[in-house]
Amino acid sequence: MNKTAPSEFYRLFLIEKLPEPLTPASSHLQLFDNYIDGTRLRLRKIRDPYTKTWTWALQQHIRVDGDHGISKLSEIHLDEAEYEIFSRFEGREIRKNRYFHEVDQVSFTFDAYLGALFGLCTARVDFDSDARMEAFMPPPFAIFEVSGDEFFNGEQLVTKLFSDIREHVARIGSIAPPPGETADE
């Protein structure tokens, strides 16, 4: 039995909207993430709106490298009764719709946020190694890469409004290198 959470290698990008052919009505999952105050834990409910089935989990997401998208995710799957016991610890909630789509033979996960964060859309790509993550070229629909920006961690976003996102994007946009360039060039 593996007693440690495996490392996740990913890149996270802000996007203006879901890329074609995706629309808000495209096949998706509904995620309800409740961040438990004072911890690194979240309760997650996932609903498939098409089958009307639910999945419940207790998760801990720990960032390993602050400059890149490297983290560890530990997860315990719960049944509904167990979830209800933990629900007394529910903190603040983020709701989002999650879409899966391949673009140029690369599998992306797209999140369209709801509620107070309505208007925020992200695209995430997962990798099997740090080297592949570093070699990946951002897609043309990416506005900014925010893989290492703690502002976009769920436990931070849960306290934000979309207006906070706009202000932060305006700040990082003024210091971001032009598309195709990196700060190291």
Image: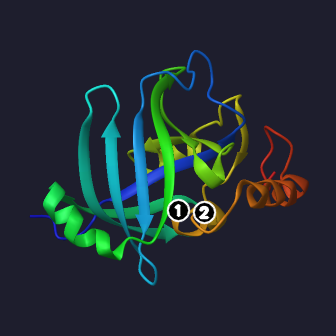
Q: Position of residue 96 (x, y in %)?
A: 50, 45
> In terms of secondary structure, where does tag 2 sit?
helix
Say which amino acid is labelled 2: Leu
| Residue plotted at (65% across, 31% down) | 139
Q: Decide: is 76 above or below 40.
A: above
State the quadrant of the N terminus.
bottom left
Q: Is residue 61 left or right of residue 85?
A: right
Q: Position of residue 21 (x, y in %)?
A: 57, 15
6 up-or-down from 35: above or below: above
> Which is nearer the eye, 101 or 135?
101
User: Residue farthest to the top?
Assistant: 21
59 up-or-down from 183: above or below: below
User: Which residue corresponds to the image point at 45% horizontal and 84% vertical from the top-left?
Assistant: 38
- Which residue is at the front of the view, 154 or 32? 32
Q: Quadrant of residue 23?
A: top right
Query: What secondary structure is found at the residue carrying circle 1?
Result: helix
In the image, what residue type sits under mark 1?
Answer: Gly
Q: Are marks 1 and 2 in contact (CB under 8 Å)?
A: yes
Residue at x-position 52% and y-position 46%: 133
In the rendered image, the residue lying farthest to the right is 174
Instruction: Report the disc number at residue 154.
Output: 1
Identify the residue shown where x is 64% and y is 54%: 116
Instruction: Give the labeled residue for mark 2.
Output: 157
Tell me the colour scheme of the image: rainbow
Give coordinates of residue 42: x percent, y percent: 38, 67
Q: Residue furthest left?
A: 1
Q: Nearer the viewer, residue 155 or 171?
A: 155
Numbered tag placed on residue 90 in the rendering? none
